[in-house]
């Protein structure tokens, strides 16, 4: 299990590096890098599923710690998936802006048409205002989606932690009950020992006085 855990951690680092390259890529290499990142994310998902199975095979003393490690990997994976979605949305926004600029530049006007110049200025102002509004809304939506994803991941981690704490408390409660029974049995054994010693002494005294 340890080897698979460390291997998955290395893949997560590779995905983080891939996302950094994607953020700085605006050419046709974007889709190639995106496919590489998606393949790595699929490997992480597969490894987490295998780790979930291996956790249950760990000794009880290590199972809780192993479960926490796997939950951390899942949290990182969800965070990376959200980051990739945001990068895709940002790229689509850039592509739309490029198409809008190209459309404005290619629009034909008459040489001395002042109304056409006014229309261009109006279109540019309207386009800039609209783009800024859309960018703001998209950023808010992306941040909200990332926050919701992180909250869901944290909620699952807290639920699993609570369950493990309850299991641990049940185990400790059972252990305390066993210890109390052992202590009670020890006290009873002491009474039996001392009682037997006293009875033995009395019998020896009686034999000594009446038979010797």
Image (spheres, grey):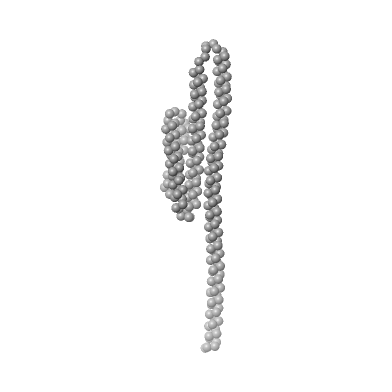
**Residue at horizontal 54%, vertical 60%?**
174
**Residue at horizontal 57%, vertical 30%?**
136
Q: Is residue 147 above or below residue 65?
A: above
Q: Is residue 152 above or below residue 135?
A: below
**Residue at horizontal 56%, vertical 70%?**
187
For the image, the number of numbered tags is 0
Q: Is residue 182 above or below residue 118?
A: below
The spot of residue 109 in percent (x, y) is: 52, 14
Nearest to the observer: residue 155 or residue 191: 155
Q: Residue furthest top?
A: 112
Asked if one can make out residue 11 in the rendered structure from this viewpoint, the answer is: no
Q: Is residue 63 above or below residue 83?
A: below
The spot of residue 114 in percent (x, y) is: 56, 13
Nearest to the observer: residue 204 or residue 31: 31
**Residue at horizontal 44%, vertical 40%?**
42
The spot of residue 178 in percent (x, y) is: 53, 63
Asked if one can make out residue 192 in the rendered structure from this viewpoint, the answer is: yes
The spot of residue 66 in percent (x, y) is: 47, 50
């Amino acid at each position: 299990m340890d080897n698979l855990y460390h291997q998955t951690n290395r893949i997560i680092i590779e995905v983080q590096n891939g996302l950094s390259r994607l953020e700085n890529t605006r050419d046709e290499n974007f889709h190639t890098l995106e496919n590489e990142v998606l393949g790595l994310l699929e490997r992480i998902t597969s490894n987490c599923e295998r780790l979930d199975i291996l956790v249950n095979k760990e000794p009880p003393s290590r199972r809780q710690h192993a479960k926490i490690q796997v939950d951390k990997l899942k949290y990182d994976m969800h965070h990376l998936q959200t980051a990739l979605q945001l990068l895709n949305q940002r790229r689509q926004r850039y592509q739309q802006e490029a198409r809008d600029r190209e459309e404005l530049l290619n629009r034909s006007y008459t040489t001395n048409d002042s109304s056409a110049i006014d229309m261009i200025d109006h279109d540019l102002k309207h386009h800039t205002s609209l783009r800024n509004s859309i960018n703001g809304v998209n950023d808010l939506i992306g941040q909200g989606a990332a926050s919701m994803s992180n909250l869901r991941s944290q909620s699952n981690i807290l639920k699993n932690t609570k369950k493990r704490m309850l299991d641990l408390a049940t185990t400790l409660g059972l252990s305390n009950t066993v210890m109390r029974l052992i202590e009670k049995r020890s006290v009873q054994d002491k009474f039996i020992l001392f009682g037997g010693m006293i009875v033995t002494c009395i019998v020896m005294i009686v034999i000594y006085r009446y038979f010797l």
